[in-house]
Image (spheres, grey):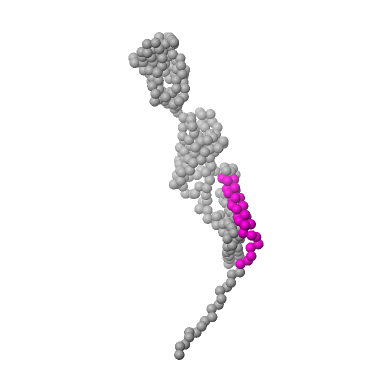
Amino acid sequence: MTTLPESHDFPEPPSVERSAQPLSPATYLAVSGAGLALSVGLLLVLVLGADRILAAGLDHRVFYVLLVPLGLSAAAFAFGAMNSTGTFTSQGKRQVGLTGPAMFAALVVAGGFLLVPEGGLLTLAVRVDRSVEAGGGPVAGARVTIDWGIQRLTQTTDVNGQASFVGLPPGAAPIQLLAEAEGHTPERRTLPSIPPGNVVQLELAPQAYMTRVTGTVFDRQTRAPIEGVALNFGSGTAADTTDASGNFAVSLPLPTGARIAVVGTRDGTRGLNTEVIVNDAVTIQLDFGSR
Protein backbone atom coordinates (compact mmCIF):
# COMPACT_ATOMS: atom_id res chain seq x y z
CA MET A 1 0.00 0.00 0.00
CA THR A 2 1.40 3.33 -1.04
CA THR A 3 1.42 6.13 1.49
CA LEU A 4 0.83 9.57 0.06
CA PRO A 5 3.02 12.32 1.41
CA GLU A 6 1.45 14.52 3.99
CA SER A 7 0.00 17.65 2.43
CA HIS A 8 0.88 21.08 3.70
CA ASP A 9 -1.24 24.14 3.52
CA PHE A 10 0.66 27.21 2.39
CA PRO A 11 -0.71 30.65 3.09
CA GLU A 12 -2.05 32.57 0.17
CA PRO A 13 0.22 35.41 -0.95
CA PRO A 14 -1.02 38.78 0.19
CA SER A 15 -3.11 40.45 -2.42
CA VAL A 16 -1.97 43.79 -3.72
CA GLU A 17 -4.80 46.20 -3.80
CA ARG A 18 -4.39 48.83 -6.47
CA SER A 19 -6.22 52.05 -5.92
CA ALA A 20 -8.14 53.45 -8.81
CA GLN A 21 -6.51 56.42 -10.48
CA PRO A 22 -8.63 59.53 -10.07
CA LEU A 23 -7.64 60.92 -13.50
CA SER A 24 -7.33 59.44 -16.97
CA PRO A 25 -3.91 58.38 -18.37
CA ALA A 26 -4.13 61.16 -20.95
CA THR A 27 -4.46 63.74 -18.18
CA TYR A 28 -1.43 62.35 -16.40
CA LEU A 29 0.50 62.46 -19.66
CA ALA A 30 -0.43 66.12 -20.06
CA VAL A 31 0.70 66.89 -16.49
CA SER A 32 3.96 65.02 -17.09
CA GLY A 33 4.61 66.93 -20.33
CA ALA A 34 3.84 70.25 -18.66
CA GLY A 35 6.25 69.48 -15.82
CA LEU A 36 8.97 68.51 -18.28
CA ALA A 37 8.44 71.67 -20.34
CA LEU A 38 8.55 73.79 -17.18
CA SER A 39 11.82 72.11 -16.17
CA VAL A 40 13.41 72.86 -19.56
CA GLY A 41 12.19 76.48 -19.46
CA LEU A 42 13.50 76.92 -15.92
CA LEU A 43 16.83 75.43 -16.97
CA LEU A 44 17.15 78.01 -19.75
CA VAL A 45 16.33 80.83 -17.33
CA LEU A 46 18.94 79.63 -14.84
CA VAL A 47 21.63 79.21 -17.52
CA LEU A 48 20.98 82.58 -19.15
CA GLY A 49 20.83 84.30 -15.77
CA ALA A 50 23.84 82.49 -14.32
CA ASP A 51 25.93 85.67 -14.10
CA ARG A 52 23.24 87.47 -12.07
CA ILE A 53 22.75 84.46 -9.80
CA LEU A 54 26.50 84.30 -9.32
CA ALA A 55 26.77 88.04 -8.64
CA ALA A 56 24.05 87.72 -5.98
CA GLY A 57 26.20 85.17 -4.13
CA LEU A 58 23.56 82.43 -4.20
CA ASP A 59 24.57 78.86 -3.51
CA HIS A 60 25.05 76.54 -6.47
CA ARG A 61 22.14 74.40 -5.29
CA VAL A 62 19.72 77.10 -6.45
CA PHE A 63 20.06 75.47 -9.86
CA TYR A 64 18.38 72.35 -8.49
CA VAL A 65 15.06 74.13 -8.01
CA LEU A 66 14.24 72.80 -11.48
CA LEU A 67 14.06 69.33 -9.90
CA VAL A 68 10.65 70.19 -8.40
CA PRO A 69 8.74 70.31 -11.73
CA LEU A 70 10.93 67.47 -12.98
CA GLY A 71 9.86 65.36 -10.01
CA LEU A 72 6.24 66.20 -10.75
CA SER A 73 6.73 65.12 -14.34
CA ALA A 74 8.29 61.80 -13.29
CA ALA A 75 5.54 61.11 -10.77
CA ALA A 76 2.72 61.87 -13.20
CA PHE A 77 4.26 59.71 -15.91
CA ALA A 78 5.07 56.73 -13.67
CA PHE A 79 1.82 56.70 -11.70
CA GLY A 80 -0.65 57.89 -14.30
CA ALA A 81 0.65 56.89 -17.70
CA MET A 82 2.41 53.65 -16.68
CA ASN A 83 0.17 52.73 -13.70
CA SER A 84 3.26 52.21 -11.55
CA THR A 85 3.35 52.68 -7.76
CA GLY A 86 5.88 52.30 -4.98
CA THR A 87 6.14 52.53 -1.20
CA PHE A 88 8.91 53.80 1.03
CA THR A 89 8.83 53.55 4.82
CA SER A 90 11.47 54.81 7.23
CA GLN A 91 11.55 53.65 10.85
CA GLY A 92 12.96 56.06 13.40
CA LYS A 93 11.75 58.36 16.09
CA ARG A 94 8.97 59.14 13.68
CA GLN A 95 7.56 56.97 10.99
CA VAL A 96 7.67 58.39 7.49
CA GLY A 97 5.77 56.79 4.66
CA LEU A 98 5.61 57.73 1.01
CA THR A 99 3.44 55.91 -1.46
CA GLY A 100 2.52 56.17 -5.12
CA PRO A 101 3.45 59.33 -7.01
CA ALA A 102 4.76 61.06 -3.89
CA MET A 103 7.60 58.55 -3.70
CA PHE A 104 8.63 59.10 -7.34
CA ALA A 105 8.62 62.87 -6.90
CA ALA A 106 10.63 62.65 -3.67
CA LEU A 107 13.23 60.35 -5.25
CA VAL A 108 13.80 62.71 -8.17
CA VAL A 109 13.97 65.89 -6.08
CA ALA A 110 15.89 64.55 -3.08
CA GLY A 111 18.14 62.31 -5.18
CA GLY A 112 19.09 65.09 -7.59
CA PHE A 113 19.73 67.47 -4.71
CA LEU A 114 21.78 65.14 -2.52
CA LEU A 115 23.79 63.42 -5.24
CA VAL A 116 25.62 66.59 -6.22
CA PRO A 117 29.41 65.92 -6.40
CA GLU A 118 31.38 66.90 -3.33
CA GLY A 119 31.89 70.64 -3.42
CA GLY A 120 28.94 71.11 -5.78
CA LEU A 121 28.82 72.01 -9.42
CA LEU A 122 30.64 75.23 -10.19
CA THR A 123 30.02 78.32 -12.27
CA LEU A 124 32.76 80.44 -13.80
CA ALA A 125 32.20 83.88 -15.35
CA VAL A 126 34.89 85.25 -17.69
CA ARG A 127 34.80 88.98 -18.43
CA VAL A 128 36.77 90.23 -21.43
CA ASP A 129 37.72 93.92 -21.75
CA ARG A 130 39.95 95.90 -24.08
CA SER A 131 43.21 97.10 -22.58
CA VAL A 132 43.69 100.80 -21.88
CA GLU A 133 45.80 101.25 -25.03
CA ALA A 134 42.98 99.68 -27.04
CA GLY A 135 40.44 102.14 -25.65
CA GLY A 136 38.98 100.04 -22.81
CA GLY A 137 35.42 98.74 -22.58
CA PRO A 138 33.90 95.26 -22.89
CA VAL A 139 34.63 93.07 -25.92
CA ALA A 140 31.41 91.59 -27.30
CA GLY A 141 31.65 88.51 -29.51
CA ALA A 142 35.02 87.39 -28.14
CA ARG A 143 35.63 83.63 -28.18
CA VAL A 144 36.46 82.26 -24.71
CA THR A 145 37.78 78.71 -24.40
CA ILE A 146 38.50 76.87 -21.14
CA ASP A 147 40.24 73.55 -20.66
CA TRP A 148 38.47 72.13 -17.60
CA GLY A 149 40.08 68.80 -16.79
CA ILE A 150 39.50 66.66 -19.88
CA GLN A 151 36.76 68.97 -21.17
CA ARG A 152 37.21 71.86 -23.60
CA LEU A 153 34.33 74.34 -23.45
CA THR A 154 33.78 77.44 -25.59
CA GLN A 155 31.45 80.41 -25.15
CA THR A 156 31.04 83.77 -26.89
CA THR A 157 30.93 86.93 -24.79
CA ASP A 158 27.68 88.92 -24.65
CA VAL A 159 27.26 92.69 -25.07
CA ASN A 160 28.75 93.14 -21.60
CA GLY A 161 31.85 91.17 -22.55
CA GLN A 162 30.96 88.21 -20.33
CA ALA A 163 30.89 84.47 -20.97
CA SER A 164 29.35 82.18 -18.31
CA PHE A 165 30.23 78.51 -17.86
CA VAL A 166 27.59 76.72 -15.75
CA GLY A 167 27.54 73.26 -14.17
CA LEU A 168 31.29 72.63 -14.08
CA PRO A 169 32.35 69.59 -12.03
CA PRO A 170 34.78 70.24 -9.17
CA GLY A 171 38.35 69.03 -9.04
CA ALA A 172 39.72 70.40 -12.33
CA ALA A 173 43.11 72.03 -11.83
CA PRO A 174 44.89 73.83 -13.28
CA ILE A 175 42.36 75.67 -15.44
CA GLN A 176 43.47 76.94 -18.86
CA LEU A 177 41.76 80.04 -20.30
CA LEU A 178 42.02 81.54 -23.80
CA ALA A 179 40.25 84.70 -25.05
CA GLU A 180 40.35 85.64 -28.74
CA ALA A 181 38.83 88.54 -30.69
CA GLU A 182 39.47 89.98 -34.12
CA GLY A 183 42.01 92.80 -34.09
CA HIS A 184 43.37 91.84 -30.66
CA THR A 185 46.24 89.72 -29.41
CA PRO A 186 44.92 86.45 -27.84
CA GLU A 187 45.15 86.36 -24.04
CA ARG A 188 46.02 83.13 -22.21
CA ARG A 189 45.71 82.54 -18.48
CA THR A 190 46.38 79.56 -16.21
CA LEU A 191 44.50 79.38 -12.91
CA PRO A 192 45.34 76.97 -10.08
CA SER A 193 41.68 77.12 -9.00
CA ILE A 194 38.54 79.21 -9.38
CA PRO A 195 39.17 82.65 -7.83
CA PRO A 196 36.95 84.15 -5.11
CA GLY A 197 33.67 85.37 -6.55
CA ASN A 198 33.95 82.89 -9.43
CA VAL A 199 34.84 85.71 -11.84
CA VAL A 200 37.96 86.03 -14.03
CA GLN A 201 38.89 89.32 -15.71
CA LEU A 202 40.86 89.21 -18.98
CA GLU A 203 42.19 92.15 -21.03
CA LEU A 204 42.90 92.06 -24.75
CA ALA A 205 45.58 94.32 -26.23
CA PRO A 206 45.47 95.54 -29.83
CA GLN A 207 47.08 93.07 -32.19
CA ALA A 208 50.64 93.96 -33.13
CA TYR A 209 50.82 93.57 -36.92
CA MET A 210 54.06 93.79 -38.88
CA THR A 211 53.82 92.95 -42.59
CA ARG A 212 56.84 92.90 -44.88
CA VAL A 213 56.14 94.65 -48.19
CA THR A 214 58.50 94.56 -51.17
CA GLY A 215 58.34 96.05 -54.65
CA THR A 216 60.03 97.75 -57.59
CA VAL A 217 59.75 101.30 -58.92
CA PHE A 218 59.79 101.73 -62.74
CA ASP A 219 60.09 104.78 -64.96
CA ARG A 220 56.60 105.46 -66.26
CA GLN A 221 57.88 106.21 -69.77
CA THR A 222 60.81 103.85 -70.36
CA ARG A 223 59.66 101.04 -67.98
CA ALA A 224 63.22 100.82 -66.65
CA PRO A 225 63.76 100.39 -62.89
CA ILE A 226 64.78 103.61 -61.12
CA GLU A 227 67.44 103.93 -58.44
CA GLY A 228 67.32 106.54 -55.69
CA VAL A 229 63.55 107.04 -55.34
CA ALA A 230 62.73 107.93 -51.72
CA LEU A 231 59.44 106.28 -50.69
CA ASN A 232 57.35 107.44 -47.74
CA PHE A 233 54.53 105.12 -46.57
CA GLY A 234 51.66 106.47 -44.51
CA SER A 235 53.20 109.89 -43.73
CA GLY A 236 56.19 108.47 -41.92
CA THR A 237 54.94 105.01 -40.94
CA ALA A 238 57.81 103.48 -42.95
CA ALA A 239 60.36 104.67 -45.55
CA ASP A 240 62.97 103.28 -47.93
CA THR A 241 65.01 104.27 -50.99
CA THR A 242 65.16 102.11 -54.10
CA ASP A 243 68.45 100.37 -54.92
CA ALA A 244 70.20 100.06 -58.30
CA SER A 245 67.54 97.60 -59.44
CA GLY A 246 64.69 99.87 -58.33
CA ASN A 247 63.78 97.54 -55.47
CA PHE A 248 62.53 98.53 -51.99
CA ALA A 249 61.39 96.75 -48.83
CA VAL A 250 59.55 98.08 -45.77
CA SER A 251 57.82 96.61 -42.71
CA LEU A 252 54.35 98.04 -42.03
CA PRO A 253 52.35 97.71 -38.77
CA LEU A 254 49.27 96.71 -40.77
CA PRO A 255 47.52 93.42 -41.57
CA THR A 256 47.35 91.98 -45.06
CA GLY A 257 44.61 93.67 -47.06
CA ALA A 258 44.97 97.09 -45.44
CA ARG A 259 45.51 100.13 -47.68
CA ILE A 260 48.21 102.77 -47.18
CA ALA A 261 49.30 105.90 -49.07
CA VAL A 262 52.81 106.07 -50.56
CA VAL A 263 54.67 109.12 -51.89
CA GLY A 264 57.88 108.92 -53.95
CA THR A 265 60.43 111.67 -54.66
CA ARG A 266 63.73 111.74 -56.52
CA ASP A 267 66.16 114.64 -56.42
CA GLY A 268 63.48 116.72 -54.70
CA THR A 269 60.87 116.05 -57.39
CA ARG A 270 57.69 114.20 -56.58
CA GLY A 271 56.85 111.63 -59.19
CA LEU A 272 54.71 109.16 -57.30
CA ASN A 273 51.61 109.63 -55.17
CA THR A 274 49.31 106.63 -54.88
CA GLU A 275 47.78 104.06 -52.55
CA VAL A 276 48.81 100.42 -52.25
CA ILE A 277 47.29 97.30 -50.69
CA VAL A 278 49.47 95.70 -48.02
CA ASN A 279 50.39 92.16 -49.03
CA ASP A 280 53.51 90.20 -48.11
CA ALA A 281 52.94 87.61 -50.85
CA VAL A 282 52.95 89.98 -53.84
CA THR A 283 55.73 92.20 -55.18
CA ILE A 284 54.34 95.71 -55.71
CA GLN A 285 55.13 97.55 -58.95
CA LEU A 286 55.05 101.37 -58.82
CA ASP A 287 55.40 103.86 -61.68
CA PHE A 288 57.46 107.03 -61.20
CA GLY A 289 57.18 110.12 -63.38
CA SER A 290 54.57 112.37 -64.94
CA ARG A 291 51.75 110.89 -66.97
| Residue 14, percent from left and from top | 57, 73
54 falls in the magenta region: no
Residue at the image position 46 percent from the left and 44 percent from the top: 152
Q: At which x and y percent is residue 228? A: 37, 13
Decide which of 50, 155 is in the foreground and name it: 155
Residue 30 part of the magenta segment:
yes
Q: Quadrant of the N terminus?
A: bottom left
Residue at (36, 13) in percent of width and height: 224
- Depth order, front residue of 285/183: 285
Q: Is residue 227 visible?
A: no
| Count of marks, rendered view | 0
Q: Which residues are magenta?
A: 18-47
- Furthest residue in direction bottom, as rendered: 1
Residue 141: image location, x then y, percent? 52, 35
Q: Nearer the viewer, residue 2 or 188?
A: 2
Residue drawn at (58%, 63%), measured in percent from left and top?
Answer: 85
Q: Residue furthest right?
A: 22
Which residue is at a point 52% across and 51% down the rendered structure image?
120
> Which of the image's four quarters has the C terminus?
top left
Relative height, residue 101 to residue 209 (above, below): below
Judging depth in this view, the residue of 255 and 128 nearest the camera is 255
Q: Position of residue 129 (x, y in %)?
A: 53, 34
Q: Main secondary structure of the magenta part?
A: helix
Q: Is residue 53 placed above or below 182 in the rendered structure? A: below
Query: Is 211 left or right of 78, judged from the image as shown?
Result: left
Q: Is residue 222 above or below residue 21?
A: above
Examine the rendering and report whether any part of residue 34 can be seen: yes
